Image (cartoon, rainbow, N blue to C red):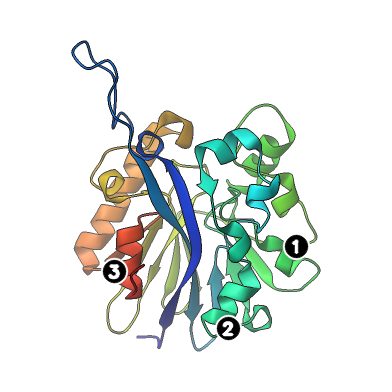
Amino acid sequence: MADITVTFVDRGRVQADRNFVVDGHSVATASDRDPDHEYETYVVWNLVVETPEMTILWDTGSHPEAADGYWPTPLYEAFAHVDAAEHALPVDLEKAGYSIEEVDAVVMSHLHLDHAGGLHNFVGTDVPVYVHREELPYAYYSANTDEGSIAYLASDFDRDLNWEIVHGDSYHLTDGVELLHLPGHTPGLMGAFIDRPEQPLLVVGDEAYVEANYAGQPMATSLLWNNGAWKESLEQCRDRQRATGADVLLGHDLTVFESLAGTTD
C-alpha cells in the first residue's frame, strides 16, 4: 500500500438556498403557500494529496474576486462565495504547509467557477492539469455560447495550461490514487479513490453536494447535466464505499468536511 497523506484545505464559505442543493426541499402546497426557505452555509475545499511519486492538488477553488464582479451577478446571487477574497489559493496552501511551487500535478474534478478559479496560478508552467475528456469541450462550449451551463467562465480555464486529458471510467494517476469518472453534475465530473494506509478516502465531490444527495435526493435540475447519469454515478460511489469501507468526502457539506478534516468553525 502506498504511503499517502491527504491534507484538507479550507477555501471558504458559500451561502445558498437549500432548494438549489436538495431538489424540492421547500415547496409551496395548497395548505402552505408560503413555506420557509433555508439559506445555508456550505464549504469550498481543496485537497493536497502527497504520495511518494508526486504532490497532487485537487481543484483550485474560487477566484478571489468572485464577489467583486468576477462571477456573473445571477450566479453570485444564487451561490455567494462570501469570503473568497480571504481565500486566495497561495495563501490557503501556505496555511496548510504547502506552496504553489510544491505542486507536481493538479486534478480538476470539473471546471465550474468554484473549482477552477485558481488555475491562473499555474499559467505558463509545466505543471500538468488533469481534466476528463468529457469536461473540457463542454466547458468551452458553455463559456463561449448561450447554451450549456452558466457556471463555466472562460477566464478561469481558457489559458496557457498544460492540460492532461483523462479518458474512460477509471484512471490510475499514481500508486494509490485512482480517478473516477462520475458524470451527472457535469459531463466530465471526476471523483477519486485514495488508498490511504489508515483509512481509504472516496472523494465524491459534486456528485453529492451534501449528505441528502448521497442518500439519493438529487440537486436542483439547474445543477444536473444529466439526471440518469447522476443516478448511475451515485450507485458507483455507493458500491465502492460498501466494498472498501472508505470515508466519503462530499462536495460542499460543511459538517462532513469538518469531521474529516478534524476541524470546527
Residue identified by numbered label 2: 98
Image-based side of 24 in relation to 136, left or right:
left
Name the residue nearer the viewer: 230 or 46.
46
User: Could you tell me residue 214's position as x and y percent?
Assistant: 28, 48
Residue bearing mark 3: 259
Specify the quadrant of the image occupied by residue 101.
Answer: bottom right
From the viewer's perspective, is the residue at label 1 or at label 3 nearer?
3
User: Mark 1 is on which residue type?
Assistant: Leu
Quadrant assignment for the C terminus = bottom left
Helix, strand or loop under label 1: loop
Question: Label 1, label 3: how many angstroms apart (C-alpha)?
Answer: 34 Å
Task: Give how far across and how far down residue 245 sits, in percent.
Answer: 21, 68
Name the image quarter holding the N terminus.
Answer: bottom left
Q: Nearer the viewer, residue 4 or 232?
A: 4
What kind of residue is marked 3? Ser
Q: Which residue is mark 1?
A: 161
Q: Earlier in the sequence, mark 1 or mark 2?
A: 2
In the rendered structure, the answer to whether residue 37 lies left or right of residue 174 reads left
Residue drawn at (60%, 56%) of the image: 62
Q: How far apart in space, not on screen, are marks 1 and 2 (Cα)?
A: 21 Å
Residue plotted at (50% across, 54% down): 168
Q: Residue at x 28, y 18 (%)?
A: 28
Discs 2, 3 touching: Cβ within 8 Å: no
